[in-house]
Image: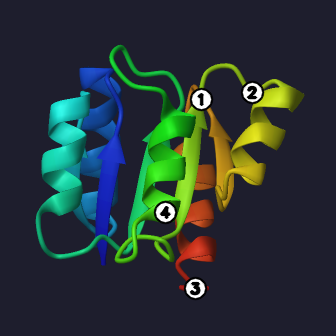
């Protein structure tokens, strides 16, 4: 199962990618707009996107809307990652098509359960 992890915090991205690889997932990481575009265009199409809401040169909600409007990506599950899980932020993400929301600091057991749930791996 292929996952694209989009997060600009190198230590967190490294930790989560190692954890998910240990759990059997194939993980690609992107931290800025150029990397996001490159990874999303690169085959294979991901089975899941983990998307940080706040990126230095991109808005996570905008990226989510672009994913949802792309014919090849529109059905790929997206879980939003955020340090600021306000009610408004969660509602905005869900309204834009997010399949889940995880707050930082990320608890690995919560992440793994969310990933398995949205990917239908229960």
Real-space CA distance between mark 4 and mark 2, rounded to the nearest whole angstrom: 24 Å
Q: Residues within 10 Å of mark 3 (few under 14, many from 20)?
A: few
Residue in the picture at 59% in, 29% down: 82
Residue closest to the far top: 56
* Residue bearing the label numbered 3: 120
* Residue bearing the label numbered 2: 85
Depth-wise, is mark 4 or mark 2 nearer the camera?
A: 4
Say which element carries label 4: helix
Real-space CA distance between mark 3 and mark 4, rounded to the nearest whole angstrom: 22 Å
Q: Quadrant of residue 61?
A: top right
Query: Depth check: 19 or 89 in front?
Result: 89
Real-space CA distance between mark 4 and mark 1, rounded to the nearest whole angstrom: 22 Å
Residue in the picture at 51% in, 37% down: 62
Residue in the picture at 66% in, 62% down: 99
Labels 4 and 2: the sequence-earlier one: 4
Q: Quadrant of the N terminus?
A: bottom left
Real-space CA distance between mark 2 and mark 3, rounded to the nearest whole angstrom: 25 Å
């Amino acid at each position: 199962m292929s996952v694209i992890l989009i997060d600009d915090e190198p230590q967190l991205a490294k930790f989560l990618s190692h954890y998910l690889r240990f759990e059997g997932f194939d993980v690609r990481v992107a931290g800025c707009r150029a990397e996001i575009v490159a990874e999303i265009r690169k085959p294979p199409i991901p089975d899941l996107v983990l998307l940080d809401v706040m990126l230095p040169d991109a808005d996570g909600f905008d990226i989510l809307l672009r994913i949802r409007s792309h014919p090849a990506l529109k059905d790929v599950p997206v879980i939003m990652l955020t340090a600021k899980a306000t009610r408004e932020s969660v509602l905005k993400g869900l309204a834009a098509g997010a399949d889940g929301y995880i707050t930082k600091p990320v608890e690995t057991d919560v992440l793994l359960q969310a990933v398995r749930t949205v990917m239908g791996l229960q």
